[in-house]
Image: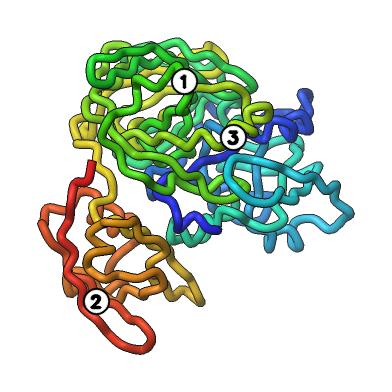
Amino acid sequence: MTLRLGVHLFIVWLVHLIILQSAHAQPFLLPEGQLKQKLSFDLVHNLMIIPVTLNGEGPYNFILDSGVGPIIITDSAMVDSLYASDLALFKIRGRGIGDEIEAYVINHMFPSIGDAKTNGLSLVLLRNDPFQLSSYVGMPIHGIIGSDVFRSFSVKINYNRERITLYPPDAKVKKRGRRIPLKIINNKPFLDVTLSNEGHEKNLLLLLDSGAGHAVSLEQKEENRDLVPDRTIEANLGIGLNGPIHGLIGRLSKVEIAEYELEDVVTAYPSPEFELLKQLLGDRNGSIGGELLKRFHLFIDYANEEIYLKRNRKFNDPFEHNMTGMELYVTINQGERRFFVGRIEMNSPASRAGMQVGDELLSINLKNMDKYSLEDINQLMHRSTRDQIIVELLRDGEIYFKFLDLERRI
């Protein structure tokens, strides 16, 4: 299974592998006297992709994910050039349906982010990439990096400019916006959020998860039942380490973080069939992800257990779900990108138009696919100003034109 099957990206908590990350390992450090490090990132599917160097090679593309512990290498092809030795093999069970995933722990690795370097860390290598991140994002993705960055620096994130600034924890920085306390649990940030649905209101502690593309994801616990709206659609919510995560998509009438109120928020409700994983994942309520976070300027400070939020120009953008019911993936061969249909939801515009899994897209609205990025198409399917889009596709050697009537299904 691949991430082309999902709209949202879920990164599993590798709790028992975090133990392998020595508590005495040195975090990232800037050269003496350097007060900050600026980085540009690419934003695709609400995910931040930053450049990371490993053992002096790269840069490689890593997703910056506040919801993950150790650094994870998902592209096993990197390892031959980085490290040649016998590796300890572990088996991981994470969120999703499927077999256990084999992973290795690689010690004495030296990642760097710009001028920020380490004295050596242990990294996790997935033997086979269950996420197929490159296909999902439309560009080469080599891994995921998380708490090692956030526990090393205070992190300022500007989604509008697609820029991150890293500051040493003791740096004197002017922090703008509303201060909100964070609770750091197992090197992961949680904050209090008030959720409202059809007259029901509840305050919950949610994971701040920059590596998730959704706005809000809420576990379908018995005590949260009042927060599941009457109107939902079944959906594939993404891919975990062990396969697809199924559930529902609906809307919360309001999400409040301090004085900030966001209305009509698209929310994912993963199926309760994953209860068997609670012992590993821990009892949690859910998370807020990039679709919500990108509406703010963020300043995340683990050392002082706080986050500063300031609304940006995206704050009042409406929350939307995919209006076609069609999910795409990309293949990249010698720089050539090709776009394919990876999944079609039942009773969706794509289904009614006769689209099929495996169709290759040649043009959208008579514009050749080489003029689009995957993020361009994602925005078109979520926020199109047209009532209909025209898709030219290739199927079994034949060219077809399909007309998709966009529909706000939730």
Q: How far across and down, in percent of the image, does residue 348 sit?
A: 26, 56
User: Regarding mark 2 in the picture, which secondary structure is present there?
Assistant: strand
Look at the image and tell me in which quarter the N terminus lies.
Answer: bottom right
Q: Label 3: few (<14), some or many (≥20) within 10 Å?
A: many
Camera-nearest label, 1 or 2: 1
Q: How far across and down, in percent of the image, does residue 251 sit?
A: 27, 32
Mark 1 to mark 2 CA distance (whole Å): 46 Å
At label 2, which amino acid type do we have?
Glu
At label 1, which amino acid type do we have?
Glu
Q: Name the residue under label 3.
A: 68
Q: Is residue 79 left or right of residue 264?
A: right
Q: Quadrant of residue 378?
A: bottom left
- The residue positioned 68% from the left and 63% from the top of the image is 77
Q: Is residue 104 left or right of residue 162?
A: right
Q: How far across and down, in percent of the image, does residue 209 sit?
A: 48, 31
At label 3, which amino acid type do we have?
Val
- Find the residue positioned furthest to the right: 86
Could you tell me if residue 60 is visible in this image?
no
- Indicate which disc, 1 or 2, sits on the residue closer to the N terminus: 1
Q: Name the residue under label 1.
A: 222
Camera-nearest label, 3 or 1: 1
Q: In which quarter of the image is residue 265?
A: top left
Mark 2 to mark 3 CA distance (whole Å): 39 Å
Q: How far across and down, in percent of the image, does residue 64 sit?
A: 51, 40
Callout 3–callout 1 Cβ contact below 8 Å: no
Q: Name the residue under label 2.
A: 392
Q: Is residue 362 above or below residue 189?
A: below
Between 290 and 357, the one lying in front of the other is: 357
User: Regarding mark 3 in the picture, which secondary structure is present there?
Assistant: loop
- The residue positioned 35% from the left and 82% from the top of the image is 395
- The residue positioned 72% from the left and 56% from the top of the image is 127
